[in-house]
Image (cartoon, rainbow, N blue to C red):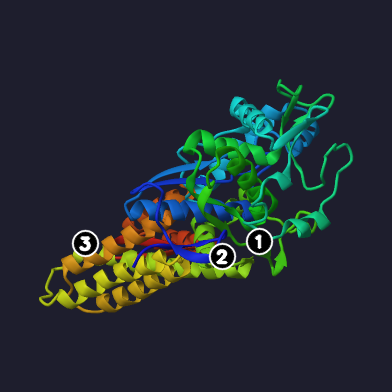
Amino acid sequence: MSLVIYNTLTRQKEVFKPLEEGKVKMYVCGPTVYNYIHIGNARPAIVFDIVRRYLEYRGYDVNFISNFTDVDDKLIKAAKELGTGVPAVAERFIQSYHEDVCALGVQKADHHPRVTETMPEIIDFISKLIEKGYAYEAKGDVYFKTRSFEGYGKLSHQSIDDLRSGARIEVGEIKKDPLDFALWKAAKEGEIFWESPWGNGRPGWHIECSAMAKKYLGDSIDIHGGGQDLTFPHHENEIAQSEALNEAPMAKYWMHNGYININNEKMSKSLGNFVLVHDMIKEYDPQVIRFFMMAVHYRNPINFSDELLQSAHASLSRIRTAYENLKHRQEVSADLAEDTAVWEAKVSQFKKDFISEMDDDFNTANGIAVLFDAAREANVYLQSENTSKSVLSDFITLFEELTGVLGLALSAEKELLDEEIEALIEERNKSRKDRNFARADEIRDQLKDMNIILEDTPQGVRWKRQ
């Protein structure tokens, strides 16, 4: 089976055929760095991290770009509120972004370009659009002439006339048409600015991604991704300005992840129900959050609640426990089994099933179902008194390989064990050795109160979170 991707542009699944064999050029819209990211920002970060990982697993050389919007109205407002400059605000929250998504298992992009570092390319891009008749200057502002681009509306599947009825001109804008959008904004008093042929100012939002994609990936790319909310107007406008200038399709495949609801309500700052990742990872195992995100197909909406996170914790624990049991058995197995072919075939089939599910538009939900099936069969195998080291090794390799594709750490709990808990477990071990069983039991109860369950095994003390 070939890898197929649902293309927002055509509204159908298409066999993936990159522009250059074996290579993938991929651009994903990153955050506006004026605050800590919320759980909605985390979803595309995780989704497209998995897309990238899977493409690499399938043998592609992926060039992955994800930008930072480090200057816009929100950053200017945040800088005023914090009594600092826009660059300082951006730097602070870029570092926080990296810390938060790293905790969620997200790898850094090959490049994380910033608007402020791409200003020459942005100005050049706008200048050429003006030269070609697709844009015009108006008292220091520059606007894109939306009607001049024949294909406008093709991504969001809206007609130009329908869009016209909902368009308006904001106070202070000098547009020729309400549908026109800003490429460059004249500087207001006291705001950060850059020099340009049209006077001091800064870029509009949409132009930055077109300029960055062109700079790092060229005129046409394979995959452009982002949240569903970016389909219109952001990605629609990117297509218009990029294809007007480059006279080539901006992206062959457009991918968009679904929304996140909080307790069955759409997440919204106006409703006050948004959740910051910075706070979440202090309360929950970040790997559970990642697992929770991939338990639903990326294009479907996902509901966020404490109950569902607890369910994700239990589900991930099933896979981790099966893996740990395999590792423990491998250490003590006498390798007495003779007929291993049946089990080796089962393990091989699980891998094929996983690839088949992931080839179907990166269906992580079904991919996880394959892992559950593998965990169940592993537990069946472990019930046998006679096990083969080779079959155990095959199972272990399977779990490590497939969870690696998904960016899940099978032993994350050990990494999360803090120094206080480590010290208590060490003290308990010493107390038992010294036959101070009262103290050992006291520590066990203390750890239980901290949701740490200890298991005494012949191979030593094992532990897990409750």
State the residue position of label 3. 331
Q: Residue at x 34, y 54 (%)?
A: 57
Above/below status of 123 relative to 421: above
Q: Residue at x 61, y 47 (%)?
A: 239
- Do we see residue 358 in this rendering? yes
Would you place residue 63 above or below residue 424 in this image?
A: above
Q: Along the polypeptide, which appears first: circle 3 or circle 2?
A: 2
Secondary structure found at label 1: loop
Name the quadrant containing residue 458. Answer: bottom left
Q: Disc 3 on helix, strand or loop?
A: helix
The x, y position of residue 383, in whole percent, is 26, 79
Q: Residues within 10 Å of mark 2 (few under 14, many from 20)?
A: few
Q: Which residue is mark 1?
A: 157
Q: Which residue corresponds to the image point at 48% horizontal and 37% vertical from the top-left? A: 218
- Quadrant holding the N terminus: bottom left
- Give the alpha-carbon distance from disc 3 to disc 2, as whole Å: 51 Å
**Badge 1: residue crowd in 10 Å (few <14, some 14–19, many ≥20):** some
Q: Nearer the viewer, mark 3 or mark 2?
A: 2
CA gap, disc 2 and disc 1: 9 Å
Q: Assign a secondary structure to mark 2.
A: loop
Amino acid carrying mark 3 in the image? Glu
Q: Are marks 2 and 1 in contact (CB under 8 Å)?
A: yes
Q: Choose the circle earlier in sequence order: 1 or 3.
A: 1
Report the side of 167 relative to 59 (left or right).
right
Residue 48 in percent (x, y) is at 50, 53
Q: CA distance from mark 1 to mark 3?
A: 58 Å
Residue 382, position in %: x, y?
Answer: 26, 75
Q: Amino acid at mark 1?
A: His
Residue assigned mark 2: 11
Query: Which residue is most to the right?
Result: 171
